[in-house]
Amino acid sequence: MMARVSQEIIERVRDASDILDVVSKYVDLKKRGQNYFGLCPFHNEKTPSFSVAPAKEIFHCFGCGTGGSTIDFIMEYEKIGFVEAVQRLGEQYGIEVQLTQAKGGKELFSNLYELHEMAMTLYHKNLFSEKGKSVLSYLSDRGLEKEILEQFKIGLAHETWNELLTLAKKKKMSNETLEKTGLFLNTEKGTFDRFRNRIMFPIFNTAGRVIAFGGRALDPEDPAKYLNSPETPLYRKRDIFYGLHSARQPIREHGYAIFVEGYMDFLQLFQAGIQNVIALSGTALTERHALQIRKFTHRVVLAYDGDSAGIDASVRAGYLLLRFGIEPGIVQIPDGMDPDDWVRKSGADELKEAVDKAVPVLSFHIQTKDAKSLPSVQRSEFIKDVVSQISGVSDGIIRDDLLKSLAQEMRVEESDLLKNMNSQKQRNLKEPIPASSRESNEIPLTSKVQKAQVILVKILAGEDLDARQTVREMIHLELFLEPVLKKLAKMIIPIYDEIDYPAIVGQFDSDAERKLVTNILMGGIDESNLTSLVQDCIRTLKAHPIKENIREIRIRIRELEEAGEDPTEAIIEVAKLQEELKSISI
Ligand SMILES: [Zn+2]
């Protein structure tokens, strides 16, 4: 049985414990401004980017992004669960932490499994119903036979808003449970099915239980061709491979695994008898994936899409696997096709042959970038880039082999490469982990529109009550377009006094969200010219939809002109919108 701690005790422990006190037992902290800095215990660094905000009772590392409350810190540092972390803190502060035998946790999980099972059955039945006929024949045109659709329980979500919801409601589960499945959308207008008008691919964990879905849009106009379940208590994207439950035995037998990008690729290969295959489930390859696959094999063949995005992704994945001591080979799928197309066009044997002849990542990288014939400046950049990838490989033998091959293929001295690598290493120690190794775990907010939202939320979450009030009066929630930022803004706008930061952090479940949120909550806005900064941000956000509108009309104008029609009306519309842009009031 799962043990639980009551909310009351959690709060008592939180109140009693002091983050500075707790963290300084593990990390040597020095005061700088309002916060404390030290060397991060969660990644390697030479200059401190790990920071603790005692007033806010949270920590955040500006290098690797890890962050959270005191309890999160103990969990992360000691690699223990929530309950145990609360117990340890309780001991430290003399609070008796009584455990209650909880149905809570266990019941939640079995409810989540049950709802997923129910959804899978419904979608699968839909596909083989009268209404599913056209979709079924589409899938059969794509070469998928009934057996494979049955085996992987492929299904269909109809174009309705509440087909699944109606069924789920009969189970009398709490709204909270429904929300946690990720199968529904909660909006101001109510709760709806998340997946509509889509071919549904159930995603199974290694035990073979359905824990999430990928949905492929049937409407070609749908902006999201693929939609996946969000992160839920059952589903952690960075841990899950699509198809691993069926492929693990074949992988062991063959001694290697084939990675593909898409569900359709997976099904096509599996059906063709290539069953040591797995697909990334709607995400880039992560370190967790590498650790996971290493339990089964040390050899991987990457058969990503043949377009340039697929080629780049397979080079990145290849170097990542190398870092974990996994030997990657890369298959280049011809003519920009994906493995699914290729097998349908040329049969499975051609792909099998290509898999046997898979190219090592380094050679593949050199070939596809045509690196040997690059002009010297770019050539040197290329070599530096590869050396930096190689320097991340922990296995010394693999690393030496790679350097040797690089020297041979690019006709440079191995000793020069070694020198370059050592000087890069020196530099890397001073810098946070390179972006490439943490990309999949982060929500990048880099555009001007996104940055403006970040700044506004930072001020709203700050300690300066006047600044918060200023911003609160000038904005409205609709300005926030990023879901995480909107959720955060919605939580903090109504707070007029002190913010309970750990409680806010606790509302964000996924790692990526928590990294972003703790970063924002640490603050760090230069408030010397607050009003004009806020005005700039708001202007950017208000202008954004108008600019988008103008862009669309310009496209229409071009189309009208090409069709020989009169675009005058559209041109006037653009002029009006431009006036509107100029007169945005704040
Ligand atoms: Zn760190």
Image (spheres, helix red, strand yellow):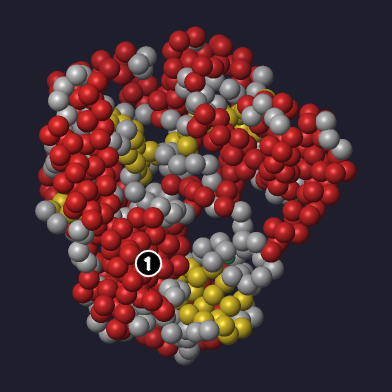
Residue 327, compared with residue 444, is above or below; it is above
Amino acid type of the residue that numbered disc 1 sits on in the rendered structure: Ile
Which of the pair 88/330 is nearer the observer?
330
The N terminus - image quarter? bottom left
Q: Element at badge 1?
A: helix
Say if residue 99 shows up in the picture. no
Whole-percent x, y for residue 81 in the image: 47, 67
Residue 437, compared with residue 254, is above or below; it is below
Which of the pair 352/381 is nearer the observer?
381
Whole-percent x, y for residue 408 in the image: 83, 30
Instruction: Identify the residue at horizontal 75%, vertical 55% (top origin).
Output: 425
Task: Determine the quadrant in which ligand 1 lies.
Answer: bottom right
**Circle 1 residue:** 455
Whole-percent x, y for residue 177 in the image: 24, 57
Residue 183, compared with residue 487, is above or below; it is above
Left or right for 222, reference 565? right
